[in-house]
């Protein structure tokens, strides 16, 4: 299949990072890579031809011209014209599709001739402004998909950019738009005011297709997104052991916008994690630490929701086990990325770029391409094993191993107020399995208290004890027994904070 050739201006150094990142983005995207090749002047080998002859000849050979206009005008020739200016004029003469992207919202620092060039382009076509790489990538993505649709090379666009069947602008929540504008302004100094009309906001974010909301618009700001996209939900499960067994002790399905699903899922996981409270030795406020840092939990979940394959009938699944967190995301990696590359700095290749940009603007996603690297760094700082990634049966799977926090909060007796710690419960089980009521007697209680139940649950989560009837956690015949890890704990207890 013949690919379209894209010429990205210009040869000046002002956009060296953006040009290279844009080429990597286009060639790394599963859809765009099928239809486009990208020419960068710096990629050609040394030759005895003049530079201006080479790049102008490449403009003639190209099918599409992408112009990046900034503050600098560039080196001028004997006629007082820069390379960027000559490229734009030649592309115009050849009636080539021209997509112009202007960096920055203010013209105060621009070269006068660059302002004139921007005005010249503006008189002939629609320009887009950008401030960050994600904004540039999203805008270019939308333009190239529009070109493919117009040329007939594709009949339906990528999922997030295509029209959502039967959806109208009335299906967009005004409150959610206002929330987004407020958050984006505070987080990234986003230019649009909170009073901007809904249609103008959607237009600015490329979330309309022929006046109708696309899938990204519904997922980001829909009143009820699952009315149109039934599998756009997140299933959260909490297991007390290390296997996926029924009945599931805690199971929630979260719906709503991508923002809602991320927030609710993160809250679910954090509420089930062990919380480690240190001492006040370093100050009046005792430090609090979870056995998985919240930054790691949030990054794993937001990546799954943002980059998943929404065409799949599967949903995102989040499973918290006694020893690990697993996030199952329908989809795969783009061709330019490997499992190994995720631990190193890499370019960003969002599976749904029109969804990714608003997440970036609201700081749900940080700097492009750093998310997985940050996860490795945060796990290392927390003294945890590095996260793991793998592909299985159409899912991209993240595994985060929980940090072992072995010192547990003591249980307070309901009647006497005397304290009996985790060691008492584990020691009570060292010779034989006991039921909950038998444990209660062994640690000096007249009845089973809520505090004792919570402590037993903590010990199960830590893997220090286990049930004798795994398949029926709530069986009336259920008993508990010490594990090898539990025996090691009572023989060599750690000193530190407490799980609460």
Image: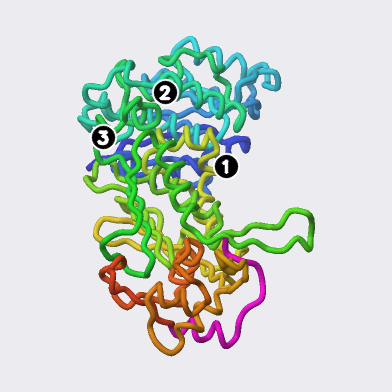
Relative image position of residue 254 (x, y in whole percent): 35, 42
Q: Quadrant of residue 223?
A: top left
Q: Which residue is mark 2?
A: 98
Asked if the residue under mark 2 is in contact with the one under mark 1, i.e. CB atoms within 8 Å, the reply is no
Looking at the rendered image, the quarter that the N terminus falls into is: top left
Give the class, few, some or many, for how many residues have Cα within 10 Å of label 2's Cα (few <14, many ≥20): many
Mark closer to the chain start, 3 or 2: 2
Relative image position of residue 186 (x, y in whole percent): 62, 29
Relative image position of residue 349 (x, y in whole percent): 42, 46
Q: Which residue is mark 1?
A: 17
Q: Residue at x 46, y 48 (%)?
A: 266
Relative image position of residue 37 (x, y in whole percent): 36, 41
- Structural distance between the alpha carbons of marks 3 and 2: 35 Å
**Which of the labelled discs sits on residue 229, or is there none?**
3
Q: Is residue 493 magenta?
A: yes
Secondary element at image label 3: loop
Whether residue 339 appears in this view of the structure is: no
Q: What segment carries the magenta color?
A: 483-500
Q: Nearer the viewer, mark 1 or mark 3?
A: 3
Q: Is residue 10 magenta?
A: no
């Amino acid at each position: 299949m013949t690919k379209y050739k894209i010429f990205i201006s210009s040869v000046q150094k002002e956009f060296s990072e953006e040009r290279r990142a844009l080429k990597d983005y286009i060639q790394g995207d599963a859809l765009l890579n099928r239809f486009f090749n990208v020419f960068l002047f710096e990629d050609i080998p040394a030759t005895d031809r003049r530079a201006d002859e080479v790049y102008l000849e490449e403009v003639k050979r190209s099918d599409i011209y992408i112009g990046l206009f900034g503050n600098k005008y560039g080196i001028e020739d004997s006629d007082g014209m820069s390379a960027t200016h000559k490229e734009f004029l030649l592309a115009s003469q050849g009636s080539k599709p021209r997509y112009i992207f202007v960096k920055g919202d203010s013209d105060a620092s621009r070269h006068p001739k660059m302002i004139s060039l921007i005005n010249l382009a503006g008189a002939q076509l629609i320009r887009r402004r950008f401030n960050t790489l994600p904004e540039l990538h999203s805008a270019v993505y939308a333009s190239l998909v529009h070109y493919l649709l117009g040329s007939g090379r594709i009949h339906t666009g990528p999922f997030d950019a295509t029209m959502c069947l039967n959806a109208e602008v009335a299906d967009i929540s005004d409150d959610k738009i206002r929330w987004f504008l407020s958050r984006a302004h505070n987080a990234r100094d986003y230019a649009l005011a909170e009073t901007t009309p809904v249609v103008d906001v959607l237009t600015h974010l490329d979330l309309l297709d022929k006046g109708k909301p696309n899938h990204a618009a519904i997922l980001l700001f829909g009143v009820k997104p699952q009315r149109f996209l039934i599998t756009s939900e997140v299933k959260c499960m909490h297991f007390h052991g290390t296997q996926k067994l029924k009945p599931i002790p805690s199971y929630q399905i979260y719906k709503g916008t991508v923002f809602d699903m991320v927030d609710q899922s993160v809250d679910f996981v954090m509420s089930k994690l062990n919380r480690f409270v240190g001492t006040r030795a370093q100050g009046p406020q005792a430090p609090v630490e979870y056995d998985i840092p919240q930054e790691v939990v949030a990054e794993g979940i937001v990546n799954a929701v943002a980059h998943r394959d929404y065409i799949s009938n599967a949903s995102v699944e989040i499973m918290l086990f006694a020893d690990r967190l697993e996030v199952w995301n329908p989809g795969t990696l783009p061709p330019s990325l490997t499992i190994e590359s995720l631990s190193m700095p890499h370019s960003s290749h969002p599976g749904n770029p029109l969804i990714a940009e608003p997440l970036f603007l609201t700081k749900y996603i940080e700097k492009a391409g750093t998310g997985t690297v940050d996860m490795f760094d945060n796990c290392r700082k927390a003294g945890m094993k590095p996260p793991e990634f793998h592909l299985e049966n159409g899912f991209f799977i993240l595994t985060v191993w929980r940090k072992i926090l072995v010192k547990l909060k003591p249980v307070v007796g309901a009647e006497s107020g005397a304290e009996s710690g985790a060691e008492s419960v584990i020691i009570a089980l060292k010779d034989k399995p006991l039921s909950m009521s038998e444990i209660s007697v062994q640690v000096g209680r007249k009845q089973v208290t809520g505090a004792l139940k919570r402590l037993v649950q903590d010990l199960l989560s830590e893997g220090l004890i286990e049930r004798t009837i795994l398949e029926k956690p709530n069986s009336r015949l259920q008993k508990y027994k010490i594990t090898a890890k539990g025996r090691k704990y009572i023989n060599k207890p750690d000193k530190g904070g407490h799980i609460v």
